[in-house]
Image: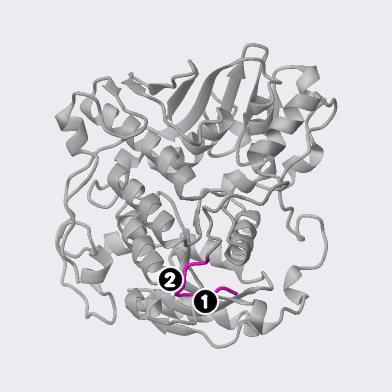
Amino acid sequence: MPTPNTPSPTGPNTPRPAGSTTRRRFLQTLGATGTAGAIALPTIVPAHVLGRPGAAAAAVPPSEQINLGVIGLGPRGTYDLRAMLPLPQVRCVAVAEVQAKRREAARALLNAHPGQGRCEFIRDFRTLLDRREIDAVLIATGDRWHARAAILAAEAGKDVYCEKPCGITMALCEEIATVFQRTGRVFQAGTQRRSVPNFQQAVQLAQTGRLGKLEALYASVYIPTLDNAWLPGQPTPAENEVDWNLWLGPAAWRPYNEQYVNGGWRGYFDFDSGARLLDWGAHTGDLCQWANQADETVPTRYEPQADRIVCHYENGVQLIFDFIADPFGDRGPKWISRLGTCPVRFVGSEGSVETGDSGETVVSSDALRAQLSPTAQRVQGLDVTAHAEDFFQAVKTRQATAANPAVMRNSHVTCHAAAIAWMLQRPLQLAPTTFQFVGDDEANRLRSRAERQWA
C-alpha cells in the first residue's frame, strides 16, 4: 500500500504503461475488427453475479488491506457501504456522522460484519481525516458537502469515492479536478452506471459505429425545480445529537428543521445541485458524454425548451436532457417504462438503443439484437459493487478510475450548464476549455456560490 499521506509517484493521472489497455483503446479495437456477434464487456463482474461464493471469504494479508473511513452514512451511504464491506481488501475503521441516530445505525451495520474488526464512530469528519492509517474515504453526505469534504480528504492524503453530484456548482467540480491532479490522489465519482454491463454495452454500440453516425443522445432527468423557501425554524438539538453547524457546513445558514436532516433538504436551492437536474443527470448525462466519446470536452451551446434542454457538441451530436414528469412511474410514449430509472437512449443514422436500471436493453433492429450479450442484463443499474471494486483496485495500482476527476468535471459541468440555461430561460454558449459562458455575466455568476464560514 502507498503511504496514505504521500502522493504516489505513479498517481492516477500517470499514463498507463505501453501495451496496457484503456477503455477507449478497447472500444476502438472492437470497432475496427467489426466482429459479429455479442459485444464483449470490459467490466469486472462481481462474484455474486456469477453465483460464486462471496469474495469476503478469501484471506487478504494485512499489508494488502485498505483502511476505509466513511463521511456521512444516510440511506445512500449505507447502500454503498453494504456493497463495500464484503470486499476482502476493505476494512472500515471509522465512520463520521453528525447525527447520533445514524452513528448508532452505523454501529449496528458494522457489528453485522464481525470480520471487519474495530471501527470508531465519531461526529466530526475532520477527526477522521487526521488518522494517518486511513487510506481512503467514502463520502456520502448531502450535496452541499461533497466537494469540500473530497478536497479536504485529498489534502489529507486520502483517496476518495464521492457520491454524486460531486460538486454543487460548476466551479467546485473544476476545483475537485484541479486538487486531485495536484495531490495525485485517486478519485471515483459515484456514477456507478459506468461500471454496469447493460449501460457499458449501450455505450459500445454507440462508440463502435453499430448505430451508424451518432445523431442524438437522450438523458432522462427530473423536471427541474428552483425553491428558495425556508422551512420554519425549530429548537436546535444538542450538538452531540445533531451537529447543525457541521451539517450545514459551507451551505448558507438557515434555522434548524428536522425535515432537513431526515433527507428533506432535497429540492432547496441552498442544499441541492443544479435545480435538481443532476439528481439523474449526473448519471444519464455522464453516460451520454461517454457514448459520444466526449469525456475530454463538453457541449458548447445549451438551449432550454418547454420539456427539455438541447445541448450541442462541436461534432454535431445533440445531447438532450429530457424531462420526465413521473420518474418512478409511467413514462408515457417518450420512454420505455419497464426499463426502470435513469434510462438513456442513443440514436444514430442506422439504429438506436435504449436501456435503464432494470438491466434490459432495447434496440431498433434484429441485427442489433443479435449483438447483445445476455450477461449484460444480470446487474441492475443501482449496483455499486463493480464500481467500488474499480475504485479499490485503483487505490492499489494508482491508475485512473472509471469516473476519474476529469470525467466527473466534464459531465457535471455539462449538467450544471444545462441547469443554468434552464434557470435563466435563454440559450447559452460555453467555452469548452475555460468553462466560462461567452458574453453572459449573469450566467457566469451562477457558476459558483458564496460559501459560509462554518468552522
Q: Secondary structure at mark 1?
A: loop
| Residue 376 x %, y % | 74, 41
Q: Is residue 261 above or below residue 298?
A: below
Task: Please name the predominant secondary structure of the magenta segment in the image.
Answer: loop
Callout 2: helix, strand or loop?
loop
- The amino acid sitting under disc 2 is Gly
Q: Which residue is mark 2?
A: 157
| Residue visible at 55% across and 53% down in the picture | 14
At label 2, counting other C-alpha atoms closer than 10 Å, the crowd grade (few under 14, some 14-19, many 20 or more) is many
Identify which amino acid the numbered label 1 is placed on. Thr
Instruction: Measure the alpha-carbon separation of dots 1 and 2.
Output: 9 Å
Which stretch is magenta? 1-8
Label pair 1/2, CB-CB below 8 angstroms: yes
Q: Is residue 332 visible?
A: no
For marks 1 and 2, the one nearer the N-term is 1
Magenta stretch: includes residue 422: no
User: Which residue corresponds to mark 1?
Assistant: 3
* 54 on left or right of 11: right
The image quadrant of residue 209 is top right
Q: Residues within 10 Å of mark 1 (few under 14, many from 20)?
A: few
From this view, report whether residue 391 is shown above or below residue 29. Answer: below
Q: Quadrant of the C terminus?
A: bottom left
**Position of 213 compared to 301: left or right?**
right
Instruction: Say left or right for 145 vs 76.
Output: left
Q: Residue 379 location in percent, x, y?
A: 70, 48
Which residue is at 37% across, 52% downward?
178
